[in-house]
């Protein structure tokens, strides 16, 4: 059993750092994807079932100059009540309340008067600049709201912010812990990076090599095969002397691309680049479309998806895998005409999973892709943390994890 599962929260006020930074409609505030909110529900319910009460703290949006209506967590309150099975807030006993500040007297009073079964949602932490600065005094004020600190926000675990890293020091070791979501995220990431069964296939996509250098270098010692797709592939092709037309290329990273290829050869990690591409004469869904070998793209044309041959080859590699990590799409999958490659890879990951492979999808666009294609529940694990998962796979120590383990 985990530390969290073993702990009895009866009579305790649990201060939980969640990640409720969900996408919403700018006008109606309708939630477009509640994955992160749903991910926190098992942790919340365990504490309530024990007879504890809860203070939830989160960031939401990117407020620059203090409080603003569009970044208020009050807009998420009705949906949170629905997820928890409460009636319309606020309710009082066994219900949900909202504090329009996170460290005000009102917040302190509401937190202090919570009864078993009650939930209090604090206003956006980032209305205070002290949150992102990791201010110790701010963290201490937050800590006084609860008896136990639970970090269940993997999406912000890579940030040394007041509520994710600094706050833990104000709780004794036995009263600071990961929530169920954080535990599952860490377990999934460590299974891939520390205990991967071979063949281990890493699928790395996205626009820029510069965004993925560290993860590629870290994977060279671990992955049997590394599949590279998306815009970043064309920097590799140009580095090898290929003609890539108007495709995305980071000229200042071509030497890096060569070094990665050389290191892969030394470490017996096989890098697979897309042999052919779906190309377009402009970056738009209504562009003229053709196909080309990836090293011979005509002037004025750009690669926006992997081609049929590349997709078939990648699928064969994936089907042979025992462990799969997927971070980044194969093309501009948001446009219907350039989603074939990403969809094909997603389907192959699902098929490999059905055959017994362990598959982890991490990174915002990859997660968006499996959700869009309806495959999220058909892979082994879908991470809620884009930047955090990326930094974990780069081999970095995440402050939000280190603070609990210290």
Image (cartoon, helix red, strand yellow):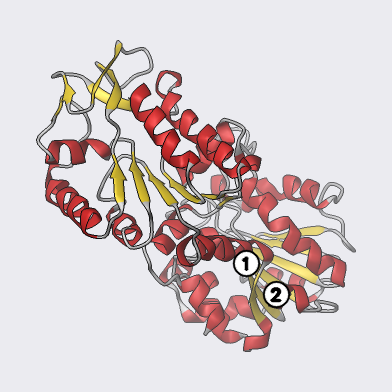
* Image-quadrant location for residue 10: bottom right
Q: In this view, does 260 lie to the left or right of 161?
A: left
The tag on residue 183 is: 1
The tag on residue 157 is: none
What is the secondary structure assignment of the residue under circle 1? Answer: helix
Tell me the quarter of the image containing the N terminus.
bottom right
Could you tell me how far apart the alpha carbons at marks 1 and 2 are, in whole angstroms? 8 Å
Nearer-N-terminus badge (1/2): 2
Measured as percent of width and height from the top left, residue 101 is found at 62, 63
The answer to which of 237 and 80 lies nearer the viewer is 237
Measured as percent of width and height from the top left, residue 189 is found at 51, 61
Where does label 2 land, which residue? 2
The answer to which of 198 and 211 lies nearer the viewer is 198
Residue 115 makes an appearance in the image: no
Residue 53 makes an appearance in the image: yes
* Image-quadrant location for residue 219: bottom left
Q: Image point 68% across, 83% down: which residue?
A: 175
Measured as percent of width and height from the top left, residue 144 is found at 65, 81
What is the secondary structure assignment of the residue under circle 2? Answer: loop
* Image-quadrant location for residue 340: top left
Q: In this view, does 2 lie to the left or right of 259?
A: right
Q: Image point 38% across, 56% down: which residue?
A: 223
Where 364 sits versus 276, above or below? Answer: below
Disc 1 to disc 2: CB gap under 8 Å: yes
Callout count = 2
Measured as percent of width and height from the top left, residue 284 is found at 34, 19
């Amino acid at each position: 059993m985990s530390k969290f599962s073993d702990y009895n929260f009866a009579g305790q006020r649990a201060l939980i750092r969640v990640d409720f930074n969900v996408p919403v409609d700018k006008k109606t505030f309708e939630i477009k994807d509640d994955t992160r909110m749903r991910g926190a529900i098992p942790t919340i319910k365990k504490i309530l079932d024990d007879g504890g009460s809860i203070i939830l703290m989160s960031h939401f949006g990117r407020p620059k100059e203090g409080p603003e209506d569009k970044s208020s967590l009050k807009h998420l309150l009705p949906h949170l009540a629905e997820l928890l099975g409460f009636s319309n807030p606020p309710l009082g006993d066994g219900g949900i309340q909202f504090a329009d500040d996170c460290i005000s007297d009102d917040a302190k009073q509401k937190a202090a008067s919570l009864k078993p079964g009650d939930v209090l949602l604090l206003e956006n932490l980032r209305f205070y600049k002290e949150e992102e600065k990791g201010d110790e005094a701010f963290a201490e004020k937050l800590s006084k709201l609860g008896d136990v600190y639970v970090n269940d926000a993997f999406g912000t675990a890579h940030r040394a912010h007041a509520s994710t890293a600094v706050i833990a020091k104000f709780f004794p070791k036995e009263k600071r812990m990961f929530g169920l979501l954080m535990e599952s995220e860490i377990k999934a990431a460590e299974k891939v990076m520390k205990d991967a069964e071979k063949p281990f296939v890493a699928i790395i996509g996205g626009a820029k090599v510069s965004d993925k250098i560290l993860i590629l270098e870290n994977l060279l010692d671990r992955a049997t095969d590394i599949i590279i797709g998306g815009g970043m592939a064309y920097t590799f092709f140009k580095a090898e002397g290929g003609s890539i037309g108007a495709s995305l290329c980071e000229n200042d990273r071509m030497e890096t691309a060569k070094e990665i290829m050389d290191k892969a050869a030394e470490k017996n990690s096989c890098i697979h680049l897309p042999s052919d591409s779906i190309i377009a004469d402009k970056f738009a869904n209504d562009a003229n479309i053709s196909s080309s070998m990836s090293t011979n793209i005509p002037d004025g044309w750009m690669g926006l998806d992997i081609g049929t041959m590349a997709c078939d080859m990648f699928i064969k590699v994936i089907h042979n895998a025992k462990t799969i990590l997927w971070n980044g799409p194969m093309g501009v999958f948001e446009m219907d005409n350039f989603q074939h490659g990403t969809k094909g890879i997603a389907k192959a990951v699902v098929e490999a999973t059905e055959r017994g492979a362990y598959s982890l999808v991490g990174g915002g666009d990859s997660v968006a892709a499996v959700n869009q294609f309806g495959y999220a529940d058909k892979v082994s694990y879908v991470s809620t943390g884009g930047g955090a998962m990326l930094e974990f796979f780069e081999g970095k120590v995440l402050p939000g994890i280190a603070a609990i383990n210290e």
